[in-house]
Image (tube, coloured by chain):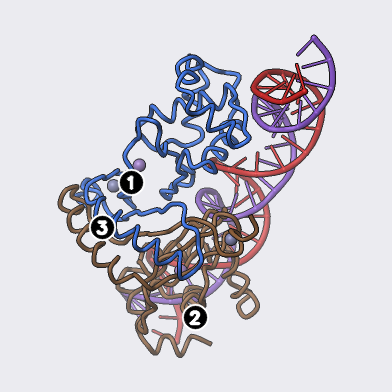
Chain colours: A blue, B brown, C red, D purple
DNA sequence: TTATTTAGTGAAAACCATTTCCATTAATAG
DNA sequence: CTATTAATGGAAATGGTTTTCACTAAATAA
């Protein structure tokens, strides 16, 4: 029952209230699942995980909550080309590491990588600064994905 | 009538045949439009441009052709979060410049930028090399997008 | 050229992730 | 507690994309 644990941390409740949102049971549960999951979950994946324990939380609410969380910057909405949006927890108190993705165009496998990130981040920061200035564009975040064939798929060709 | 001009270049016909595809009128016309358009066109945008001159080319064929062109690496399929796929010509004989994108999360405006690209490309090449080795992943291309607020949208807040 | 093969096609229907609608519920302020 | 109104669930609608299938035409053989 995340009610106690999570409220206790105060983090989420504060964040929500601070932005004019109410922290409802559904939102709390969905956030809880996202924060504990590794993968890249679709709305339905999340619904499936939520439903057994909280059958009162509907799929519509999952979609709506994911929108809210995205706009708050608490989750990233990703597109790996398989026809449905995927979501991953952006960062919490304990902080999951920022990372980028390798996407197999054949089997849709996705690899998170955190190596090579430091140089990337540094370049990105500079680039962001330059772009912000030149285009008067307020950059909030970025998406970097490499597309190609995973080990398995390039073997079977 | 692209028939003459384009065939003349030989480029496309050769590319298609070399990959086991036939170069049909529909494909030729769609490719022609993509190669001459600046923006980020949706399947329907393309259909609208094709239809007046070639009413025999249906929307289904536009989708199918875009799939083929994507898989041949002749166009990039992009997602800017507005609920439909966008396509842009990858590179032709005359070579459009490779670029990345700034996407406004408020009004969906997309800015192509080609500055700062050189450093990015260099880093990307290194990163690709490292990732390929470490994950045994054959990288074919990459996607880099910055999300935030365009000048207009950050002003009206 | 003509005949044969088969990739490609258009139109309509199906698909299916996501959004909208609306009556109901429940979080918050006072 | 009561009043306010954000949030919700379920059903229906939406709409971009895919599938189906009978038909067409590009490549190839004869
Ligand atoms: Mn990831
Ligand atoms: Mn572009
Ligand atoms: Zn793969
Ligand atoms: Zn904007």
Q: Which residue is mark 3?
A: B139
Q: Quadrant of ligand 1?
A: top left
Residue A13 on image: x %, y %: 54, 26
What label does residue A107 carry, if any?
1
Q: Based on the displayed image, in which of its 4 quarters is residue B12 positioned?
A: bottom left
The residue at the point 34 percent across, 53 percent down is: A105
Q: Mark 3 and mark 2, same subunit? A: yes
Labelled pair 3, 2 in contact (Cβ < 8 Å): no
Instruction: Provide the chain ID for the residue under circle 2.
Output: B
Numbered disc in front, either 1 or 2? 2
Vertical relation: A66 (above or below) B35: above
Mark closer to the chain start, 3 or 2: 2
- Mark 1 C-beta to ligand 3 under 8 Å: yes
Q: Along the line of sight, which residue is nearer the eye, A32 or A80?
A: A32
Q: Residues within 10 Å of mark 1 (few under 14, many from 20)?
A: few
Give the Cα separation between the discs numbered 3 and 1: 14 Å
Vertical relation: A99 (above or below) B41: above
Q: Secondary structure at mark 3?
A: strand
Q: Mark 3 and mark 1, same subunit? A: no
Residue B26 on image: x %, y %: 51, 74
Instruction: Provide the chain ID for the residue under circle 3.
Output: B
Q: Mark 1 and mark 2, same subunit? A: no
């Amino acid at each position: 029952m995340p009610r106690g644990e999570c409220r206790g941390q105060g983090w989420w409740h504060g964040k929500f209230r601070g932005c004019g949102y109410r922290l409802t049971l559904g939102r709390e549960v969905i956030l809880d699942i996202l924060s504990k999951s590794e993968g890249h979950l679709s709305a339905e994946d999340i619904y499936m995980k939520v439903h057994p324990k909280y059958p009162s939380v509907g799929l519509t609410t999952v979609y709506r909550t994911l929108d809210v969380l995205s706009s708050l910057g608490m989750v990233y909405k990703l597109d790996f080309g398989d026809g449905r949006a995927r979501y991953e927890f952006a960062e919490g108190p304990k902080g999951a590491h920022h990372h980028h993705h390798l996407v197999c165009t054949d089997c849709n496998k996705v690899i998170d990588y955190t190596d090579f990130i430091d140089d990337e981040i540094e370049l990105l920061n500079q680039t962001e600064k330059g772009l912000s200035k030149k285009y008067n564009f307020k950059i909030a975040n970025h998406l970097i994905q490499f597309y190609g064939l995973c080990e398995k798929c390039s073997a079977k060709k």
